[in-house]
């Protein structure tokens, strides 16, 4: 029994030592953020002697001396130098901002992604992929009419992501840029038919970001636009990956500034409806109630009780129904998504909503609504 324990201990010790000795050293070749500079990580030393037991003959642990390959630092340095030299040779007078050494075409071997800043007027970001001796420029989208051509961006920055952003199994190269008037740009590329195809170009003056808005674990792309008539509001256009391209699938409203209290804009019929749902989402129930006309027959307490289980509300597709606007009244349509915690389960609902709104000296107010539930689902994952 004693001997058995000892054997177990020795084997356990051997296993621990072995496991420790075999912990893979970081492969700088595959390091995701490689600037062309190799860092040598010393390999932990193998124990030269194993503990031996005395009394009973012990089986010799055989799992000791698998030789650990010593990383060849010279090879890595040479790769880095060659990549840097090749990239600088193509840079002309542009400044190299950053380099990534990652597998951008899913063939198992890394390529160089280089991002440059050119001192043109206006200055512009450009990028290419260096794969062995082949150079693939990442072509920027044509600028929209009336806007200057800034390539991937006007200012020097290095915001590159190499990952499968649309969950189709292939990696994308995502490059963010910035330009005048607070504009953010996002270019997306994927390796396809021997070239890097531009999958999409997105821009907005209130940011562009990846975000999973519906809880399916796939990220959508959100373009944010500030609302000219109500600078506290942002209008998000949400693009979803569908088969071969990103398409505009929905929109929603949000706050541009995060600080509170939020000033609720009510100087247009649509803004009053947007403000009402943003207030609900913020759980500012008194604020939301104040946007209802007092002739609503329910007291605040009764009304507020209806939102006891609400955890999130969002609103989009807000517009005045054509032909309904008069000087003092209008009908405003909106698509509302609500999320409620019902007995521990999160239930999402999509509502087609139509509000009758009325002008008051204090701004537009919500009088009453007709709602139609279009969809109801249980959220398996809470975004
Ligand atoms: Ca590759
Ligand atoms: Ca992909
Ligand atoms: Ca999603």
Image (cartoon, helix red, strand yellow):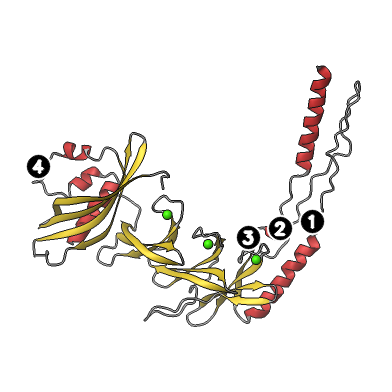
For mark 2, what is the residue? 28
Mark 1 or mark 3, which is nearer the start of the sequence? Answer: 3
Point out which mark residue 71 bears: 1
Residue 134 in picture, x, y percent from top left: 66, 76
| SS category of the residue bearing label 4 | loop
The residue lying at 29 percent from left, 65 percent from top is: 227
For the residue carrying disc 3, how many other residues have a C-alpha within 10 Å: few (<14), some (14-19), or many (20+)? Answer: some
Q: Tell me if label 2 and label 1 are in contact, CB under 8 Å.
A: yes
| Residue in the foreground of this view, choosing between 127 and 371 | 371
Using the rendered view, name the quadrant where residue 265 is placed. Answer: bottom left
Would the CB of label 2 be found within 8 Å of ligand 1?
A: no
Q: Is residue 125 left or right of residue 249?
A: right
| SS category of the residue bearing label 2 | helix
Mark 2 or mark 4, which is nearer the start of the sequence? Answer: 2
Decide if residue 254 is in sight here: yes
Mark 1 or mark 2, which is nearer the start of the sequence? Answer: 2
Residue 368 in picture, x, y percent from top left: 13, 50
How many badges with numbers are in the image? 4
Residue 210 in picture, x, y percent from top left: 45, 59
Mark 3 or mark 2, which is nearer the start of the sequence? Answer: 2
For mark 4, what is the residue? 297
Would the CB of label 1 be found within 8 Å of ligand 1?
A: no
Mark 4 or mark 1, which is nearer the start of the sequence? Answer: 1
For mark 3, what is the residue? 33
Q: Is residue 146 left or right of residue 295?
A: right
Q: CA distance from mark 2 to mark 3?
A: 9 Å
Q: Is residue 375 left or right of residue 12?
A: left
Q: CA distance from mark 2 to mark 1?
A: 9 Å
| SS category of the residue bearing label 3 | loop
| Residue in the foreground of this view, choosing between 319 and 279 | 319
| Residue in the foreground of this view, choosing between 143 and 336 | 336
Mark 3 or mark 4, which is nearer the start of the sequence? Answer: 3
């Amino acid at each position: 029994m004693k001997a058995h324990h000892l054997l177990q201990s020795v084997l356990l010790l051997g296993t621990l030592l072995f496991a420790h000795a075999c912990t893979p050293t970081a492969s700088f070749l595959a390091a995701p953020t490689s600037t062309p500079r190799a860092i040598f990580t010393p390999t932990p030393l193998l124990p030269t002697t194993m503990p031996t037991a005395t009394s009973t003959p012990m089986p010799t642990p055989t799992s000791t001396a698998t030789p650990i390959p010593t990383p060849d630092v010279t090879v890595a340095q040479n790769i880095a130098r060659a990549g840097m030299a090749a990239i600088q040779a193509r840079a002309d007078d542009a400044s190299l901002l950053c380099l990534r050494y990652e597998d951008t075409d899913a063939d198992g071997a890394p390529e160089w992604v280089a991002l440059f800043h050119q001192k043109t007027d206006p200055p512009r970001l450009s990028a290419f992929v260096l794969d062995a001796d082949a150079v693939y420029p990442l072509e920027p989208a044509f600028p929209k009419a009336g806007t200057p051509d800034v390539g991937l961006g006007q200012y020097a920055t290095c915001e590159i992501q190499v990952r499968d952003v649309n969950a189709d199994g292939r990696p994308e190269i995502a490059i963010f840029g910035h330009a005048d008037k607070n504009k953010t740009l996002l270019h997306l590329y994927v390796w396809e038919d021997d070239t890097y195809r531009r999958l999409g170009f997105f821009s907005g003056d209130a940011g562009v970001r990846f975000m999973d808005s519906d809880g399916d674990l796939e990220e959508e792309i959100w373009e944010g636009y500030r609302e000219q008539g109500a600078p506290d509001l942002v209008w998000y256009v949400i693009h979803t990956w569908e088969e071969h391209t990103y398409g505009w699938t929905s929109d929603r409203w949000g706050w541009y500034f995060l600080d509170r209290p939020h000033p609720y804009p009510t100087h247009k019929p649509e803004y009053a409806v947007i403000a009402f749902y943003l207030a609900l989402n913020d759980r500012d129930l008194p604020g939301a109630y104040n946007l209802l006309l007092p002739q609503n027959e329910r007291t605040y307490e009764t009304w507020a009780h209806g939102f006891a289980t609400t955890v999130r509300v969002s609103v989009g597709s807000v517009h005045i129904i054509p032909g309904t606007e008069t000087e003092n009244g209008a009908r405003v349509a909106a698509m509302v998504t609500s999320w409620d915690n019902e007995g521990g389960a999160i239930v999402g609902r999509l509502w087609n909503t139509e509000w009758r709104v009325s002008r008051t000296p204090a701004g537009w107010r919500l009088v009453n609504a007709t709602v139609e539930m279009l969809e109801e689902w249980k959220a398996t994952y809470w975004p």
